[in-house]
Image (tube, grey):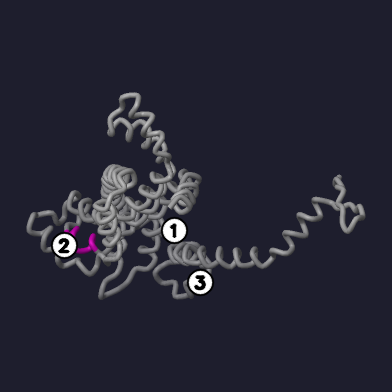
């Protein structure tokens, strides 16, 4: 049952139905829904292809877009039975977790100093940190590899953690700085009046408010580290140190390419990221909006 409301137009009283107005408004935005549908199809198409390929046998020569006439689970069975996928997930998980810990701890503390101390020196430091984001990691691969090799950091977890943390810290500091700058300094002053030190102010006042932006960092940087390939290819030369991306690479050689096995490995390798995102998506969206608006 609709409720008709009174509306005055040109000195005359008329009635309109709010539900009809809502439907009429949505009808005007049909093109937005169409664009959204097209974008959804574009984004989901690669996932469809890789899942489709993972369900085809090695002898299936049909198009990768065409759904297999008979679903073949042999690719997943061979991937799981070999055990390489679990080794890759373990290595990727260890590296990703430690990189995130380093970036979050150092990033939020550095951002607090930059956001609260408005000085010329801090402006220079902030500019230098942001300029690192303009450097493509691949362009300095040779120099980084030779340095890390000299200190025996290749094929080690800590070597990868140090390198990937260095590349990820600028973005982390930027996100935290924008967020902390929006927090009123009166909170810091009130805590200082109560006798809190700078560290106590940070851990008791500032840090509890960084939950949403921290989730944003976890997802953005976590996905980047999890999918990292180039530095892993050169640094992790031992078979036991292969990450998930390096395990996928083993299915391609000069002799033959096992697309089904590689696709099955990729699908399994994506599952941890999908699960984490499903649990953190609410905070991720809120943190992304807050960092953008408050920046």
In the picture as drawn, the residue positioned furthest to the left comes out as 150
Residue pictured at 36% horizontal, 34% vertical: 188
Q: Are marks 2 and 1 in contact (CB under 8 Å)?
A: no
For discs 3 and 2, the disc positioned in front in the rendered view: 2
Tell me, for residue 116, which label it has, or none. Answer: none
For discs 3 and 1, the disc positioned in front in the rendered view: 3
Q: Are marks 3 and 1 in contact (CB under 8 Å)?
A: no
Q: CA distance from mark 2 to mark 1?
A: 42 Å
Looking at this view, is 36 or 251 the one in front?
36
Looking at this view, is 231 or 24 the one in front?
24
Looking at this view, is 229 or 295 the one in front?
295
The spot of residue 151 in percent (x, y) is 8, 55
Within 10 Å of disc 3 (Cα), the crowding (few <14, some 14-19, many 20+) is: few
For discs 2 and 1, the disc positioned in front in the rendered view: 2
Rendered image quadrant of residue 105: top left
Q: Which residue is mark 3?
A: 65
The spot of residue 46 in percent (x, y) is 47, 66
Q: CA distance from mark 3 to mark 1?
A: 18 Å
In the picture as drawn, the residue positioned furthest to the top comes out as 194
Does residue 100 show up? Answer: no
Tell me, for residue 73, which label it has, or none. Answer: 1
Residue at disc 3, secondary structure? loop
Residue at disc 1, secondary structure? loop
């Amino acid at each position: 049952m609709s409720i008709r409301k009174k509306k005055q137009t040109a000195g005359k009283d008329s009635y309109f139905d709010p539900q009809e107005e809502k439907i009429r408004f949505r009808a005007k935005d049909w093109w937005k829904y169409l664009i959204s549908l097209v974008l959804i199809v574009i984004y989901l198409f690669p996932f469809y292809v890789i899942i489709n390929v993972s369900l085809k046998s090695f002898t299936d020569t049909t198009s990768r877009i065409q759904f297999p006439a008979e679903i073949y689970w042999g690719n997943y069975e061979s991937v799981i039975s070999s055990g390489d996928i679990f080794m890759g997930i373990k290595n990727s998980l260890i590296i990703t977790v430690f990189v995130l810990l380093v970036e979050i701890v150092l990033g939020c503390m550095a951002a607090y100093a930059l956001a609260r101390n408005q000085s010329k020196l801090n402006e220079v430091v902030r500019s230098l940190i942001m300029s690192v984001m303009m450097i493509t990691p691949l362009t300095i691969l040779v120099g980084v590899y030779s340095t890390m090799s000299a200190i025996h950091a290749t094929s080690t977890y800590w070597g990868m953690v140090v390198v990937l943390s260095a590349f990820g810290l600028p973005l982390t500091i930027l996100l935290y700085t924008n967020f902390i700058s929006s927090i009123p300094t009166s909170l810091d002053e009130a805590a200082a009046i109560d006798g809190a030190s700078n560290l106590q102010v940070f851990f008791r006042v500032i840090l509890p408010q960084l939950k949403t932006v921290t989730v944003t960092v976890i997802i953005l940087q976590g996905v980047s580290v999890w999918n990292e390939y180039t530095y892993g290819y050169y640094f992790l030369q031992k078979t036991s140190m292969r990450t998930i991306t390096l395990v996928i690479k083993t299915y391609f050689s000069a002799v033959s390419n096992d697309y089904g096995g590689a696709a099955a490995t990729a699908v399994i390798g994506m599952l941890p990221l999908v699960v984490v995102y499903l649990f953190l998506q609410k905070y991720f969206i809120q943190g992304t909006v807050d960092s953008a608006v408050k920046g």
